[in-house]
């Protein structure tokens, strides 16, 4: 389990122990929690990792915290990860890591808010309209009931229409795309931060399925498939096309569409049950 306070505590431990790690906030959540980004490296090639955009996929936040620690240890010890010297990686690349895009939602799923609090009951009232979803276990949205990974301007309107037909036409525990693109502060922070940089590649971590989605609506920028095959070989995950109903309005969708650069969704963990849209 993890919540925002535990995340901040672990992050502060890493920053104090490894002073070559840099961190800063890219913005704030609905409930005024900072959305932290950790920078590793000083090279020209810029890469973005993001996780924890869906509340009940908080395992991805834990995964990226561990990844930061592994990078830091290897850099300090001048050692390798997967036969690659991490000091070379540090010198050649700048890796930006955002482990928890949706801190409020992750707090909700992990029972951070008291059951008699206004926040908890607001979300419970939203969830009660969807009795097929368990509360708070199936909550994917931010604290307002908007799916942050359906917020981006990449065929957003079509994505909203498709999910509305499935019953998610208003604030919901999952799959409601919002009243307009980039309406939520968490999505806006990620959107504006990405525009402010010149990322060569992005990796978006979700859960679950042990698959890698590597194209957007059948289109992939140059070298995407070759990179995806390397990821698949390293992880043992399969390469798949994004399910159609999840193909619009995602952060990675927008990145590929807007910048014409490779973007990948990594679905960690084995799938334990089927869902309407998968987990992207």
Image: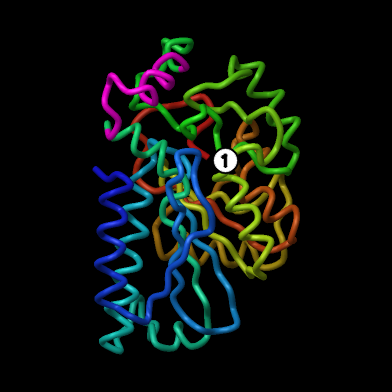
Position of residue 114 measured from the top left corner of the image (x, y, whole percent)? 26, 26
In the foreground, 121 or 254 = 121
Magenta span has 117? Answer: yes
In the foreground, 2 or 202 = 2
Position of residue 212 measured from the top left corner of the image (x, y, whole percent)? 51, 51
Q: Is 217 left, or right, of 116 in this rendering?
A: right
Q: Main secondary structure of the magenta part?
A: helix
Q: Can you tell which quarter of the image residue 65 is in?
A: bottom left
Position of residue 137 measured from the top left corner of the image (x, y, whole percent)? 33, 27
Name which residue lies at 26% across and 58% down: 9
Position of residue 225 measured from the top left corner of the image (x, y, whole percent)? 62, 61
Magenta span has 65? Answer: no
Residue 118 higher or lower than 24, as above or below: above
Residue 259 higher or lower than 51, as above or below: below
> How many numbered marks have been drawn onto this rendered protein structure?
1
Name which residue lies at 56% across and 49% down: 213
Mark 1 burial class by Cα count in 10 Å: few <14, some 14-19, many 20+: many
Name which residue lies at 51% across and 24% down: 276
Q: Magenta part of the protein: which range?
A: 112-126
Residue at mark 1: 149
Q: Is 244 left, or right, of 280 in this rendering?
A: right
In the foreground, 134 or 23 = 23
Q: Is 25 left, or right, of 4 in this rendering?
A: right
Q: How is the image coloured?
A: rainbow
């Amino acid at each position: 389990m993890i919540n925002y306070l535990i995340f901040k505590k672990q992050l502060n431990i890493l920053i104090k122990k490894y002073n070559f790690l840099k961190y800063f906030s890219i913005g704030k959540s609905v409930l005024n929690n900072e959305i932290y980004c950790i920078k590793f490296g000083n090279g020209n090639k810029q890469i973005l990792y993001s996780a924890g955009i869906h509340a009940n996929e908080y395992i991805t936040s834990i995964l990226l915290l561990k990844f930061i620690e592994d990078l830091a240890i290897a850099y300090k010890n001048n050692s390798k990860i997967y036969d690659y010297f991490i000091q070379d990686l540090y010198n050649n690349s700048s890796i930006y890591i955002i482990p928890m895009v949706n801190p409020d939602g992750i707090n909700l799923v992990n029972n951070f808010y008291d059951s008699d609090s206004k926040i908890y009951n607001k979300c419970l009232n939203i969830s009660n309209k969807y009795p097929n979803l368990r509360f708070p276990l199936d909550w994917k949205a931010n604290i307002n009931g908007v799916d942050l990974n359906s917020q981006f301007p990449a065929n957003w309107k079509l994505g909203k229409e498709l999910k509305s037909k499935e019953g998610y036409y208003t604030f919901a525990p999952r799959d409601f795309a919002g009243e307009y693109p980039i309406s939520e502060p968490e999505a806006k922070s990620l959107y504006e931060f990405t525009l402010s940089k010149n990322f060569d590649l992005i990796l978006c971590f979700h859960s679950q399925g042990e698959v890698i989605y590597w194209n957007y609506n059948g289109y992939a920028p140059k070298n995407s498939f070759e990179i995806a095959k390397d990821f698949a070989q390293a992880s043992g995950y399969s390469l798949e096309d994004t399910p159609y109903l999840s193909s619009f309005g995602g952060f990675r969708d927008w990145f590929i569409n807007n910048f014409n650069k490779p973007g990948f969704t990594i679905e960690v963990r084995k799938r334990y049950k089927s869902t309407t849209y998968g987990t992207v």
